[in-house]
Image (cartoon, grey):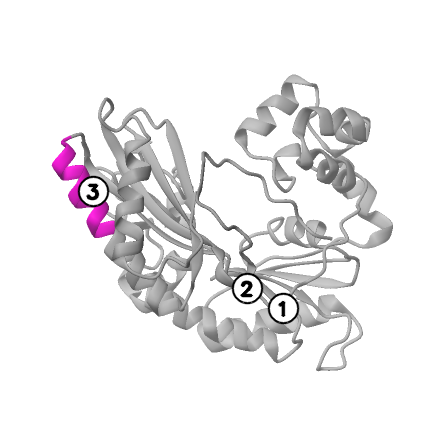
Amino acid sequence: MDQFFAAVEQHDNAELRGKPVAVGYDGERGVVSTASYEARRYGVHSAQSILVAKRLCPELIIVPARFERYKEVSTQVMDIFHDYTDLVEPLSLDEAFLDVTHNKVDMALAVDIARDIKRRIKEETGLTASAGVSYCKFLAKVASDYRKPDGLCTVHPDRALDFIARLPIERFWLVGPKTAKRMHQMGIHNGMQLRQYSLQFLTERFGKAGQLFYDFARGIDNRPVVSSWERKSVGCERTFEHDIYNPTAITVSLYHITLELLDRLQRTRFQGHTLTLKVKYHDFQQTTRSATTPRPLLCKADILPLAKQLLSETDHAQRPIRLLGLSVSNPANKTTTTQQQHQQTLQEQPLPFQTNQKASEDK
């Protein structure tokens, strides 16, 4: 969806239409969740500090997030998708992949399906969506971002390599600002230049992502659209208005985060064996600590003492804390661990692969 959260707010409140709007918490530590296109003209964007956003756009209207409302609209959109195919893989509330190789509406071309889906979303929700159509996930995703807002872009297999050759490296999947900077230093600015490097070279410098970069540069992405989804973790975190360093304040905050985590575990009925503590310090440096238990983590007595133990393994006594977070992972039905393990975690997850005709609705 285009500017999803902001679009919902502008749709529901006519006074916000045509004005620069940012959805987020209006406070010292607030962060922009979504910015309207009117706000983006000033340089306001998601994940940006609210304070920075206000400096860039003094007339910016800050609207608190209403996640229940966004979920409601998201459900409407997902229901529309399922009218065309059962192979729908949600990526978030406002984005999904659709495999329409075999569809329910007997349309021969994916682009016609994408066009019809866009029409129905507009009629039934009042919002616009952008769609990308291609033979693989990578190109469908790139195409969905190509002509926003209210865009429709198709990358035909016969033109895919030329399209990728001109594609700025920043638009490649998994290429964030740091990776883009490294690639620029190597002389890689687009797909054509990326294609000149061997698989060995890319994996030596980028690890598992190197294989993906090598394949994407050649238009290869065999990941299937996966309609069944299994929750892998449940977590929550809290960014403080002011950095905390008092031991009592830290313990109290950890207690409240534990209660919030328990509430989420109960609502999602998730059971896991691994507890991970995330600590972000005043200087934005971040560390994580994890522990795995033989039994599922189901109650406060399971989680709070373990959280305190993990906290004791950090530098919290010497450095002010900006953010604390807890998450439970390692689903109970997949655990083979028989003893408690401690580890500092920073992992990359490998991605699976497929090649069918797909329409990516970037909702």
Query: How far is mark 2 from mark 1, CA to CA?
Result: 10 Å
Q: Are marks 3 and 1 in contact (CB under 8 Å)?
A: no
The residue located at (42%, 41%) in the rendering is 290
Query: Is residue 65 in sight in this rendering?
Result: no
Amino acid type at mark 2: Glu
Main SS, magenta region, reads: helix
Mark 2 element type: loop
Of 313 and 319, nearer the camera is: 313
**Vertical comparison of 363 with 197: above or below:** below
Amino acid type at mark 3: Gly
Amino acid type at mark 1: Ser
Quarter of the image for residue 73 reads bottom left
Q: Which residue is mark 1?
A: 227
Q: Are marks 2 and 3 in contact (CB under 8 Å)?
A: no
Report if residue 25 lies within the magenta region: no
Mark 1 element type: loop
The residue located at (26%, 41%) in the rendering is 308
Report if residue 247 lies within the magenta region: yes
Residue 252: x, y in percent? 16, 44
Residue at far top of view: 185
Q: Which mark is residue 230?
A: 2
